[in-house]
Amino acid sequence: MTRWRLPAVLGLAAVTLAAALVVGDYPIAVSRVAEALGGSGSPRIRYVVLDLRLPRALAATVGGAALGLAGAVFQRLARNPLASPDVIGISAGAGLGAVAALVVFAVGPAGVVVGAAGGALLAAVAVHRLSSRHGVTGPRLVLVGIAVGAVASALTSSLLTTADLYVAEQATVWLVGSLIGRSWSHAVPLVVAVPLLSLLVAAGVRRLRLLDLGDDVAGALGVRVERSRAGLLAVATLLAAAVTAVGGPIAFVALAAPQVARRLEGGRPPSLALSAACGAALLGLSDLAARRVAAPAEVPVGVVTAVCGAPLLIGLLIRARCRGESL
């Protein structure tokens, strides 16, 4: 039974991606979608499938996988189900960097990507440094991260109040988390960066498993604890920053995907591969819902993930309180 969980979730993500190419204000039959993907069919259908729907569907699927993987790394390193990029301030830092690039430096899409990555890394460094003075623990990491996120959000709001009206409107829509209008210029960097960063995570899986046993045990087995933790945190931060640069700070996917994976595996620490697959399916389904729930208008996908993810966060808090765990 266990061996079918990952293929089943991957199948759901693939079906969701295929549905995103078929469903829309202009429905297209599966056979015609297949023709368009093969390079044949009418120019109009090829344009809709290849230029409008496919890049957005790929951004949602690959971006969801990146968030699920990043969330699993954060939660396993902190041994806390609340330690995800959007909760501990990484996404807020990426948002601050991107908004600063837009408002202060008036850069293009490439500059926004650099700003988001820089802001996420600065937030991660701040969280790590402030929470590691007496040894990193899950509760301390979460609390420090929430504080760093609050500061980043306040600075972002301050920048928006001084920005040009048009730029501020653009940034505000982006901060909600949206994949509306995403093209190949957004999807290609994500499709290239996420597999490369995933390989770096895979290279650190052994160290992550040893860190699951505790810092003392990992150190006794030859792991450089702080260096390994910092390296894994940096890669997970870049994964979250890559998605944030493309779609804004999309909430709760990185929090929810590892928890779904954990429950599918019977309560064990969330598997990295299964968490990535769950993230791909969750963000793909959320973006499909965002396209169709208020059709012909579209809802930012961040609204959908927030509506669905907020009850999960409340549930985790209640569960922790009932078990007497500190957060």
Image (tube, rainbow, N blue to C red):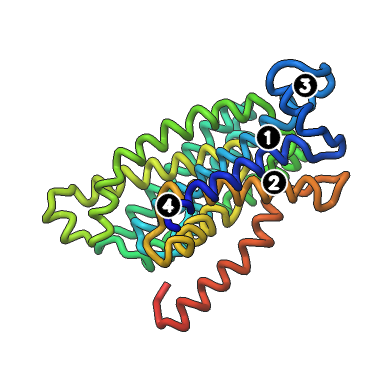
N-terminal-most mark, 1 or 2: 1
- How many angstroms separate mark 1 from mark 3 (CA)? 15 Å
Residue highlighted by disc 2: 287
Few, some or many C-alpha atoms within 10 Å of disc 4 (few <14, some 14-19, many ≥20)?
few
| Secondary structure category for the residue under label 2 | helix
Query: Residue 157: horizontal and vertical position, in percent?
Result: 64, 51
In contact (CB < 8 Å): disc 1 and disc 2: yes
Kindly report the distance in space between the C-alpha atoms of the residues bearing marks 4 and 2.
28 Å
**Dot 1 lies on which element?**
helix
Which residue is identified by label 4? 3
- What whole-number distance in Å separates the C-alpha atoms at marks 3 and 4? 37 Å
Amino acid residing under circle 1: Arg
Q: Amino acid at mark 4?
A: Arg
| First-in-chain label (2 vs 3) | 3
Tell me the distance, in whole angstroms, between the alpha carbons under discs 1 and 2: 9 Å
Q: Is residue 308 above or below residue 224?
A: below
Nearer the observer: mark 3 or 4; the answer is 4
The location of residue 3, given as percent across then percent down, is 42, 52
> Which residue is at the front of the view, 134 or 179?
179
Around disc 2, counting alpha carbons within 10 Å, would you say few (fewer than 14), some (14 to 19), or many (20 or more)? many
For the residues labelled 1 and 4, the Cα–Cα distance comes to 30 Å
What amino acid is labelled 2 in the image? Asp
Res. 56 mark? 1
Residue at horizontal 63%, vertical 24%?
Answer: 185
Q: Earlier in the sequence, mark 4 or mark 2?
A: 4
Considering depth in this image, is 165 or 304 the residue closer to the camera? 304
Question: Upstream in the sequence, badge 3 or badge 4?
Answer: 4
Q: Is label 4 in contact with label 2 (beta carbons under 8 Å)?
A: no
Quarter-of-image position of residue 27:
top right
